[in-house]
Image (cartoon, rainbow, N blue to C red):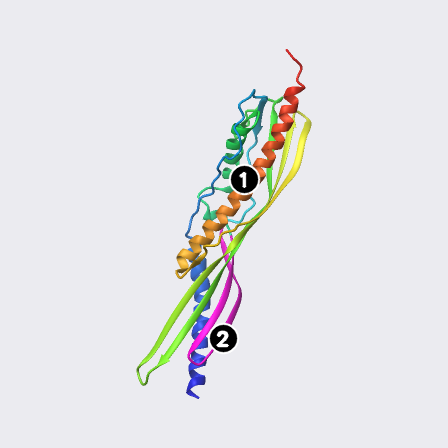
Amino acid sequence: MKHIRIISVLTLIILFTSCRTGKNMQREIQAIRSNLYYELSTPEYLEEIADTIYLNFIDYSNIDYYTTVKKAKTIIVPLVIFNYSWEKFNVTLGEGSLTQTYREFLTEALLVESNSSTCFTLRDNVANMAPDSAYIFNVKILHNRTSSAIKLNNMLVFLCLGDYSDFIFNFENYTVIPAITDLRINVRLTKGKDCLLEKNYFAYHKSNYTRGKSKDSFLANEICINNMTESLSVATKKIVENMTEELHLLMLQNLIHRPLP
């Protein structure tokens, strides 16, 4: 009878701890900031510059501000000496966990890539100073979601050595699941009233991060955020390289067919 009462009490303790862990994880993970990054890897273009394209202001990142943590499932195995619980928390990246807005990062990535590897100059048209006859490049982020998950294995060991000699040991182990980014961006290149290019670009990236284990909750949360920002950075790089390459070929063709002075 005593064992039954002990198991019941320990089960309630684990359930309470799980709920509190979810709240703490949400609070801790929203306090972490991480950097997006863009590294050039394409060959530098050293030939004649064809023309200038003006990049209009990207006004919306299409991503929630707060990073969210939602408990997906909980499994509890109550035994006489120890209780074992397994929990999974789904994590979705929010813009508040980034050191800059995503639209700013995308703008910088486009400027850096275009002005290094293409036959045109890309200028930020944030002040709307482009001439009426200029090439105008509009970018719209259609979908921007990066997610991961954290698994928590919890073992609660109970030792009863007699009256007033009860000991409880709690062992936690966190595992960060590789992040997945689903990114879709629409671009439109115009010159005057003519539309020269309109296309949607897609990137679905799953990171191959394999070092996501920790016994510390804050460190696990930090690994998770860094893993997600890395995944978003890689997905962005794929799209930026694809769109700038296509713009390069289009502008190069215009340069070839341009009448001689």
Secondary structure mainly formed by the magenta segment = strand
Mark 1, Cα crowd under 10 Å, few <14 / some 14-19 / many 20+, is many
Callout 2 secondary element: strand
Magenta segment: does it hold 200? no
Q: Residue at x 43, y 85 (%)?
A: 3
* Image spot of residue 18 (x, y percent): 46, 68
Q: Position of residue 30 (x, y in %)?
A: 44, 53
Q: Residue furthest bottom?
A: 1
Task: Tell me how many marks there are.
Answer: 2
Quarter of the rendering containing residue 213: bottom left
Q: Which residues are magenta?
A: 66-92
**Residue 30 showing in the rendered view:** no
Circle 2 sits on which residue?
A: 77
Q: Which residue is mark 1?
A: 237
Q: Please give the name of the residue rendered at 49% of the width and 47% of the height, measured from the top-left corner.
A: 229
Disc 1 element: helix
